[in-house]
Image (cartoon, grey):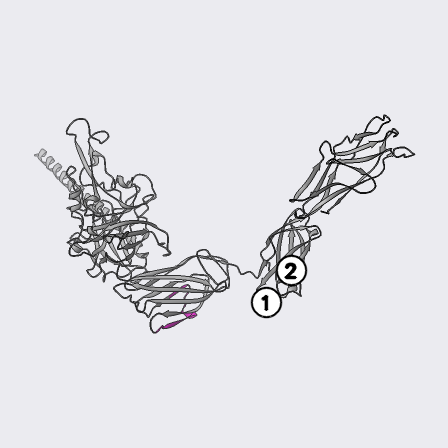
Amino acid sequence: MTSAKILKGVRNMIVKGLILWLVGLALGGVLLSRNISAQANADLTYALEHTPQGIPLQQYFKIGTSLNNHARIVDSNTQATVNTQSVELTNSTSQVGSIWSTDNNTFDLDNEQVASMWLYFGDGGSDSTDDESSKNNTAGDGMAFVLQNDSRGTAATTNMHKIYGETLGVWGYDDENNQKESPTSVAQSAIQNSWALEFDTHMNLRSQYDSLIGPGNSYDIDASAGKLKFPHIASNYPGNVNSYHVEKVYHTADGKPGWWPGNDWRSYVSLNHNGLIMGQNFNFLSNKNWHHLTLKYEPQRNGDSKIGDMTYTFNDKDPETGAPLAGRSQNVPIDKSKITDKDHPHTARWGFTGATGSSYENNLVVFEQIPDLVDVSADAQLTSLTQNKKIQENDTVKEHDSVQLDYMIKYLGGKSEWHDVVANLELPKHIKYLGGKITYSGQDNATETITFKDFSAATLIRKLSHIFNRNRSHVKISLNGEVAEGAGKVSAATSSFKGTEAVAEATVPSFRVAPLKFLELRLTNESTQDVDEGQFVKIAGNVAVQDENLKNPDLRLHVKSNGQEVYNQPLSGSDAFGAINQKLQSSLFTENKNDVTVWVTDNQGHTSDPIALTVYLGRLALKSVTGNLNFSGQLNGRTQLLKSQEPFSVNVEDTRKASGSGWHLEATATALDKDDAAGQPLAGQLLYKANGLTTVLSDSAQNVISHTNSERVIPNKLTTDPDQGFYLQVDGGAVGGTYTGRITWTLSNTP
């Protein structure tokens, strides 16, 4: 009995322990679920608090009616975008969601279409470039823009017995049979008669034999698109067999067939990715940012009316400011026959689908412009009236410039009018707005006045009293103002024009404000001047003066050459106000090349910006000549010709203008007298030989060298060749001794 009691006690303990363990597991599951929900809710709260401008949805869209649809419409949670709604497609694991256009809001395949929207993919990505793992990417799985004519209408979704994220709710389902998949069976499970543009946040890359167990997870192994490694955007036809590819993987080391028959193999299905746009890391889509998408559709491609032309551009607006960006684009053909059916030969239902597997994200869409409903546009232009210049990106305006800011809002067409348009003007800062007016097109050309009291800070909100249609197609808002004081850069400002059916935006680009110059010097003389000695350097132009009470004597012209101020004098009172017409002596500029700075000051302490000039001073100078000439020889009673023991050279610097300038070097010589008390002259004479000519030097000036300039020479060194130079002719009756004389050189600037 004792044993029985003990055994019973043990059994009770086992049972209780099992129950407690199960309860603990259940509680753990509840806690895990709460953590997931809290994380999703926090991200959703953030997204709704930063919702971009969009339109209400109920009138134009219908939540998908498939049994497993988790999509819902949620309101913006920020005052900046009141009345904006978004569709939340998914917000947890193992979900599918869809939203579809209503029956009277279809996509017309035979006419031009423009659609724009904002997309949000949660915050599960990272900037990692490693292979995907739960550490660097928790997002899943994305969503897709879809055109479709599936017979199920708004109930269209992927036909799958269990939800799998890689389908995104539109692509075919790769089932658990890893040896019987075919493109046909996969395509048949997709949304039929459709074209999809996917935004894939989770990579599906299983391709090894051991991993090919259970449902497919290989859609992103697309050899035709190159190696897919990161989240991406791509398109194809979900219900078409040619969108899929089946690949066998054998149970061998390299996955290829072995030599023996009946090799064991498994297969996977991949998706062909057309018009690919891929990120550089896992932050491309799921990065806690809203992403703007613009779709532009043309009903013909290269003149073929059976093929449409679709261009999609991603990230073409700044999510913070709404300012336009270049974005990334792709262009693909749309085969209408793969979308239309006999009941819908010209139109398609359109919308979004999304799905999650074991990974998840908040998938949200805000619609900005709906295809074929209304086509609208808005433009903004800032103009400096003072400068008579339209301001473009990074242009400069000046303090106190008078400016005009114009917004042009246009209705371009559509099957609906554009109602209840509110202009929410985010005005460029650093401008004092004084007033303006609104001009409405149409037969009445009505106007409304805007006064300075209507402006609150840098925002102006005004409901337009105009219903936009073909007869009243545009409105112009013109605002006048003055640039405020304070230099710096002014950021771009994006304004929105939101109506019931669409939203248009216009951006004033960033610009710079330059300080108002009280003195602005403008010179009309050449920036580089060549002057010769004795000539003048010309300083001519005018100085614009903001203070009209000043007179010329209150303004001073300053000139600095090579760092030293060489001129500082008031403007002439006899000249026109601000006129400068000054001639400066070349002697103020002492170098061959002179770096000159010119500026103006006034008696109020203002200084103009300096203007740089270059002055080349042209001058003629004898820089050096051979010093002593010595002759030596033995007297023999005959006439002798003794050459100077030193070679003769002369160095002439000539930096004058080349045309027509030249010079002559002349020499005079005294008699050669004996170095004794009697000072008897030498019987002989001094000669200079050059170019076959012999010149006798005497007390009369003789031309030794002549030169004509063909270009500026700094300096000009002339050295005689062996046959040229000075010679002493000694007569036969000369008396031996030491004799001395003097040569005088004269450089003349005669041509």
Dot 2: few (<14), some (14–19), or many (≥20) neighbours within 10 Å? Answer: some
Seen as rendered, the residue at the extreme bottom is 444
**Highlighted magenta segment, given as a residue range:** 444-460
Residue 83 lies, in percent from the top left, at 29, 62
- Res 47 label: none
Q: Nearest the camera: 647 or 463?
A: 647
Task: Say which element carries label 1.
Answer: loop
> Does the magenta segment cover residue 595?
no
Q: Position of residue 630 (x, y in %)?
A: 80, 31
For residue 248, which quarter of the picture? Answer: top left
Residue at the left extreme, as displayed: 1
Q: Is residue 527 above or below residue 8?
A: below
Q: Residue 449 lies in magenta, yes or no?
A: yes
**What residue is disc 2 on?**
581
Q: Which mark is residue 548?
A: 1
Amino acid residing under circle 1: Glu
Q: Is residue 245 left or right of residue 705?
A: left
Of 685 and 560, nearer the camera is: 685
